[in-house]
Each structure stands twice: as C-alpha cells, then as structure tokens.
Image: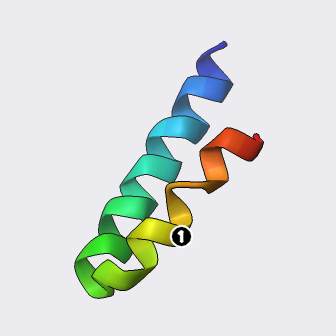
Amino acid sequence: SYLTRSLVLSFIGYLLLVTEEEPGLALDVRHTPSNL
C-alpha cells in the first residue's frame, strides 16, 4: 500500500513537471491513469 502510494505521488510529481514544461502534453497524459 505504501509502495503504491509513493509511486502515485512520484508519478503525479512527474506529471506536474511535464505540465510546466509543455502544457500541450497534459491533455494526452491525463488519459493515461484511466488505463492503469
């Protein structure tokens, strides 16, 4: 449970960095969690 939570937090942090770098990718990335 803790491992999954840490992975999710790190993934969200990565998405935030990507969103700041290139906002255009944010729309495509948002569809990824639904596939997990």
Quadrant in which residue 21 is drawn: bottom left
Crowd around label 1: few <14 · some 14–19 · many ≥20 (10 Å) = few
Quadrant (top left/top right/bottom left/bottom right) for the N terminus: top right
x and y, in percent, of residue 14 in the image: 44, 62
User: Residue 16, relative to residue 21: is it above or below?
Assistant: above
x and y, in percent, of residue 32 in the image: 64, 54
Q: Is residue 5 left or right of residue 24?
A: right
In the picture as drawn, the residue positioned furthest to the top comes out as 1
User: Residue 11, relative to residue 4: is it above or below?
Assistant: below
User: Residue 19, relative to residue 22: is it above or below?
Assistant: above
Amino acid bearing label 1 = Asp
In the picture as drawn, the residue positioned furthest to the right comes out as 36
Quadrant (top left/top right/bottom left/bottom right) for the C terminus: top right
Residue occupied by mark 1 = 28
Give the structural element (helix, strand or loop) at label 1. Answer: helix
x and y, in percent, of residue 26 in the image: 40, 69
In the picture as drawn, the residue positioned furthest to the left comes out as 20
x and y, in percent, of residue 27 in the image: 43, 68
Q: Which residue: 31% across, 61% down? A: 16
Q: Is residue 4 left or right of residue 12?
A: right
Number of labels in the image equals 1
User: Residue 14, relative to residue 5: is it above or below?
Assistant: below
Q: Which residue: 52% across, 51% down? A: 11
Q: Which residue: 59% across, 55% down? A: 31
Q: Which residue: 50% across, 55% down? A: 30
**Front residue of 27 and 19:** 27
